[in-house]
Image (cartoon, rainbow, N blue to C red):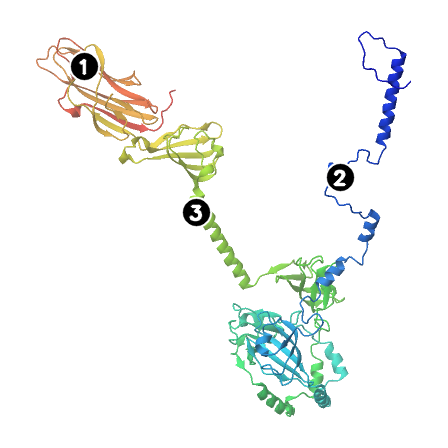
Amino acid sequence: MAYEEKTDWLPDDPINEDDVNRWEKGIKDAHTDLAAHKNDMNNPHNTTKAQVGLGNVDNVQQASKTDFDKHEQDQVRHITEDERMKWNGAQLSKISDDNGQPMFNLTTDFHTELQNYPTLTYFSYDKSAANAPPSGGRGFWTCSVGKTYGHVIVMTNDNKTFRKSLANNKWSDWIELENTEGAQEKVNVHAGKSDIHVTQAEKDNWNNSQLFKVTADNGQAKINLSETDDFHEIVPKNTGMVHFTSMSKTLNGPGTSVRGIWTINAAGDYGQIIAFDNDNKTYRKTISGGNWSEWIELETTAGAEAKVSNHVKDSVAHITAEERTKWSNAQLLKITNDVGGVLVFIEDTDDFLNKVVQAGKTFGTFYSTGKASNAPSAYSTRGFFHFTSLDDKGLGTFGYVIAVDYKNNMYSNYLDFNLGWQGWNKIETDSKSQIKADKALADAKNYVDTNYTNQKLTVLTGTNAIQDARTSGTDYPSGITFMDIGANNTTGYPLTYGFLKNEKHSNNRFTQYFYGNADTTNGSYDHVGSWIRHWWANTGWTAWQKISGFAHANIGTNGIQYLDKAAHTKIQFNRKRKDSHNAFDTKNSRFVAPNDGMFLVGVGLYMINTPAYINFHLKLYLNGSLYKPIDHKRGDFNDKESEMNLDLNGNVTVPMNKGDYIEIYCYCNYHGDDRRGVSDYNELYNYIDIQELGGLNYPTV
């Protein structure tokens, strides 16, 4: 039965079988329609890109994963890391144009124009240019970075070659280089001189001799002397033959910048130096027995050639066959390889010390990569080894090794056959040691001056200052420190402001001082004095005890003060003689304790009296109550014929806390009608004298 909607149900309508079947049919049809809709992938609702947030996406077909992987694996279109490193290491500074032709053409002046171009440049020129060779052509120009030193070589159109040099901004003249035919002719003439040439046997012999390296790896000077170096110190420390440079102000130099060569014996006390400056001058210096000669300027080229020509004719100055044989049998131990390189190469997997021993040489040079075991440095090193003895297998038994890494650090190690290698020691030059010592001293002074002034060592400010007197002593820093206590501080310091000194050795050895520093000339009597307290790790802070600036007062009276009969009358002290802390108030005759402490109170009264029964009792009141009696006079004076005055006086000690107050009372009783009281006979007889004895109100037992 097909589903038919029924919308007119009443509460008492019966439900029959047809109704239930109709409902089941409706549910089934709805599920069928829903399943068909879910499987409809043809966008049945016509949803657009914009409705799903893809309105900015282009309708472009994307590459498949297979095509993308194929592109990624295409090594023709991409470069490898090796290719990148190779091209990055290629010549990247242009010395010609993109077609391999000259970068520029000189037309005006060789000197001016060349100094405007890069340090290595291929160029052409017109013969009409100033300072040019007599014929046009092409050439190469190379110069220093500052373009004050350089060289230029040109090949003219008439098959000639010329050279010119720039030194310290000064140009030399053009020099024509020899052509092949002329050079060959001279070579042929020279080749015919058998007396000055060597035989193959001699060459073989000499090839096995000393081939010591005298320059750096790049062919430049092996040692560069600065203005702070000294020829007389550096040369003896670098024996053998050395190519060097020096500055114009190098100590014991020729007085100008030079390049040259020195050769000196192993002891460093015999040798020679020859040097060349940029003005085409040559200098020589000699050391003999440790004594240096002065610099000598040598002969010019023309003079030298003349002397050489004369020397060639001098048979005495040349060697004989016997001398040649003698010298051929001289010391020929090799310490380098045949091209002047190191004799022993120590690789990453080698044992450094074992490798030099296994070399089987009493003397030799080495290079180490720095990764070998037992190497002196993590950096590559070069140096030499020398064994004074070898065993029967040719292995070193006693000797030493000197190594220098590329950071210019030098190391030494010594081999003792009985004790073995003694360990690497880093060697420091005197100048570098002094530089380091000077720098360390300067750094230390600067650090102390910057970080350890008196104020920075002792004064705590800001958040470092402790303002609360209740703070635990363990929270204070060690040492001696100072802190300011601001005004109106009521956390437990003796005064509301002042400053603190903390002397803390440890949590069990800590003493704190409080200093009041008011200006008493302006009436701040209650803010002077010094106090001390201690911190105990188990019990905390002790009470403050005053140690300086004790209070004292001396107050008098003037006029007669009559006393009430059979009553206690407060004595009015109204004249200040002394009051260090302004602690006595004459308006109410009270002394108010400016701080905790023990006070000594002395009182004296000169009393009016007449012959009759009398009872005087002088008393001290603390905070309004009797604390101590001071003096007592009682008796019958009827037998006296005239008026008789008497003294009441005494001293008592009173412990007081800050703010406690004391007053003086006198009990008076007598017979008769004559009034009794404090006399005005002499005001010096009437006084209250108060002296602070100590800054601690000791607790009662």
Label 1 SS: loop
Q: Earlier in the sequence, mark 2 or mark 3?
A: 2
- Marks 1 and 2, how far apart in space? 114 Å
Q: Which residue is mark 3?
A: 453
Q: Amino acid at mark 2?
A: Lys
Question: Which quadrant holds the N terminus?
Answer: top right
In this rendering, the answer to whether 285 lies above or below 466 is below
Where's residue 580, x and y in %? Answer: 27, 31
In this rendering, the answer to whether 501 lies above or below 241 is above
Local crowd size for mark 1, using a 10 Å CA cut-off: few (<14), some (14–19), many (≥20): many
Q: Earlier in the sequence, mark 1 or mark 2?
A: 2
Where's residue 569, x and y in %? Answer: 22, 15
Where's residue 133, x and y in %? Answer: 62, 84
Question: Which quadrant holds the C terminus?
Answer: top left
Where's residue 492, x and y in %? Answer: 41, 28
Residue 507 can be seen in this image: no
**Direction top: furthest residue:** 12
Local crowd size for mark 2, using a 10 Å CA cut-off: few (<14), some (14–19), many (≥20): few
The quadrant where residue 531 appears: top left
Is 695 left, or right, of 27 in this rendering?
left
Foreground residue among 682 and 631: 682
Label 3 SS: loop
Disc on res. 338:
none
Q: Amino acid at mark 3?
A: Thr
Q: Which residue is mark 2?
A: 49
Q: Which residue is mark 1?
A: 563
Is 7 left, or right, of 435 in this rendering?
right
**Direction right: furthest residue:** 1
